């Protein structure tokens, strides 16, 4: 299967997931992240702001704020290019590209060197730490300048046996599901 076919397969699977399964899986993933030394020791985390169909990152962002961590979130700047900005509250966000909540223009840019740990979204992953994104290459391009550890989060029922990957796909350090950390 190619990436296009894999994305279509995952979209079919998403439609079969119950809201109860998603809530339970997301809570388990959240708890796994909280226990990671990469997270607990981080003073600045990079995390996407979840949409309705993605793994809910809002509890993680709130936890980071409650523990005095800086929170950096992505903003699409141009085709395939994103930058990262610090947010201090939900009021720092507005609807941006692709109808995703993004930091407002008033937010402060964060350099990759300031980030200690990142939570990365995906369409799917495999247990060999290959990530299938939405196809825009935003994260692959941004993470090329990263020296921080990255974790993709994926519900177990959306994981593939093997994700198609190409040389330009950025490798991630770990995949976190409700069942395990790979």
Image (cartoon, rainbow, N blue to C red):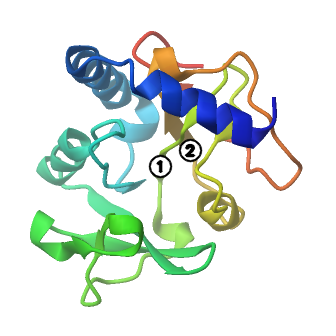
Mark 1 or mark 2: which comes first in sequence? 1
Locate residue 158, reporting x and y percent: 52, 22
Q: Taking the image as drawn, is residue 173 in sight?
A: no
Residue at disc 2, secondary structure: strand
**Total marks in image:** 2
Answer whether labels 1 and 2 touch (C-beta < 8 Å): yes
Instruction: Give the residue at the far right of this rendering.
Output: 167
Q: Is residue 24 left or right of residue 122?
A: left
Callout 1 crowding tier (Cα within 10 Å): few <14, some 14–19, many ≥20: many
What is the C-alpha distance between the residues marked 1 and 2?
6 Å
Callout 2 crowding tier (Cα within 10 Å): few <14, some 14–19, many ≥20: many
Residue at disc 1, secondary structure: strand
Residue shown at 33%/63% (left/top)?
Answer: 100
Residue shown at 41%/28% (left/top)?
Answer: 36
Residue 117: mark: 1
Instruction: Give the residue at the far bottom of this rendering.
Output: 106
13 to 119, vertically: above or below: above
106 to 124, vertically: above or below: below
Residue shown at 47%/54% (left/top)?
Answer: 116
Locate residue 19, reporting x and y percent: 22, 22
Residue 25: mark: none
Place residue 130 in its image quadrant. Answer: top right
Query: Looking at the rendering, in which quadrant would you find the C terminus?
Result: top right
Question: Which residue is more in the foreground, 23 or 10?
Answer: 10
Query: Looking at the rendering, in which quadrant would you find the N terminus?
Result: top right
27 to 67, vertically: above or below: above
Q: Taking the image as drawn, is residue 179 in sight?
A: yes
Locate residue 33, reporting x and y percent: 37, 30
Q: Name the residue beneath numbered marker 2.
A: 150
């Amino acid at each position: 299967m190619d990436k296009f076919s894999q994305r279509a397969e995952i979209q079919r699977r998403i439609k079969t997931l119950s809201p109860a399964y998603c809530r339970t899986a997301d809570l388990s993933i959240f708890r796994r992240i909280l226990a990671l030394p990469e997270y607990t020791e981080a003073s600045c985390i990079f995390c996407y702001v979840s949409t309705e169909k993605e793994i809910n990152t809002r509890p993680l962002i709130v936890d980071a704020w409650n523990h005095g961590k800086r929170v950096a979130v992505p903003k699409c700047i141009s085709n395939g290019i994103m930058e990262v900005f610090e947010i201090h509250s939900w009021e720092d966000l507005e609807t941006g590209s692709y109808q995703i909540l993004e930091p407002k223009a008033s937010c402060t840019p964060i350099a990759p060197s300031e980030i200690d740990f990142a939570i990365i979204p995906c369409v799917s992953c495999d247990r060999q730490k290959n990530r299938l994104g939405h196809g825009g290459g935003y994260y692959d391009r941004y993470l090329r300048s990263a020296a921080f550890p990255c974790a993709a989060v994926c519900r177990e029922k959306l994981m593939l046996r093997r994700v198609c990957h190409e040389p330009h796909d950025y490798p991630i350090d770990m995949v976190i599901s409700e069942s395990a950390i790979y």
